[in-house]
Image (spheres, rainbow, N blue to C red):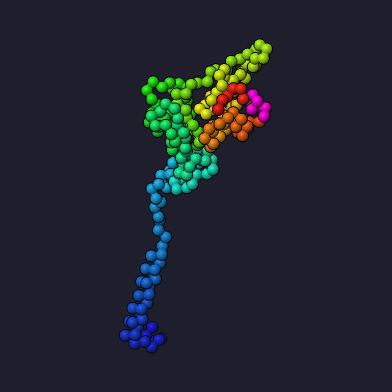
Amino acid sequence: MRSRCGLEPRALAALAVVLVGAAVLAGTHFWSARPEPVRAPDRVTEAAAAVQADGPESPNAQLPGLTPGPHAGSKAGGVPGGQIVVDVSGKVLRPGIQYLPAGSRVADALRAAGGVREGTDVTVLNRARVLTDGEQVAVGMPAAPPPVGGTGVGGAAAGQAGPAAPLSLGTATVEQLDTLPGVGPVLAQHIVDYRTEHGGYRSVDELREVNGIGDRRFADLRPLVRP
């Protein structure tokens, strides 16, 4: 090197130092730029483990922090935050509007209202039923009489007769309205929803405004209900 390039020993030593320094810098740069494994947050890790254990179709497949799809939560929209609003009336300690998590049952609404008053008969209530947004839970109200079948002249066909006494549209539950002729669970819920939205029924004629009740069905229901 010295004979070919004509370098002095001092210059050759300086060149060697520069080359060594360049090699050290290059090695440091590549070492700092190497990929490093990053540990996932605990919540995501736990949720991923639950999905792997239960399968992609399980309820745990929804990872934390993601907004549920349109089919998640309650059937009704409810209020923001996954809540529903129900009206608990009748013989409870704190009747009124209750805000409950979506998917709550009648028993949860009774607890939120302070519980049922002593001596109140709750056998007509299905306390395991899942609540829907805007529903009214009436506690201690008289149950609708069982349908009376008739086979004589002018009698209703078996299984189609309504309650013997007019049913109050202002206090009847979904289960009680379901006993009326031609009224199923869906239409009974529409009747309750209309009552909640409009503050009750001022007359039986307002049934015409309920979605699903036409002139013929209204004619069948009119003698069986009262405001």
Q: Nearer the viewer, residue 50 or 162?
A: 162
Q: Residue at x 52, y 35 (%)?
A: 199
Residue 8 horizontal side relative to residue 204, left or right: left
Quadrant assignment for the C terminus = top right
Q: Position of residue 57 (x, y in %)?
A: 51, 39
Q: Position of residue 33 (x, y in %)?
A: 41, 64
Residue 16 horizontal side relative to residue 202, left or right: left
Report the number of discs.
0
Question: Magenta region: which residues?
Answer: 215-221
Q: Position of residue 117 (x, y in %)?
A: 38, 25
Quadrant assignment for the N terminus = bottom left
Q: Say whether residue 220 is magenta.
A: yes
Q: Is residue 112 visible?
A: yes
Q: Position of residue 10 (x, y in %)?
A: 31, 85
Q: Say whether residue 65 is magenta.
A: no
Q: Nearer the viewer, residue 122 or 66?
A: 122
Residue 127 horizontal side relative to residue 151, left or right: left
**Magenta segment main secondary structure:** helix
Which residue of the protein is positioned furthest toward the front in this rendering?
A: 202
Q: Quadrant of residue 167?
A: top right
Looking at the image, is 175 positioned above or below residue 76? above
Q: Nearer the viewer, residue 118 or 184?
A: 118
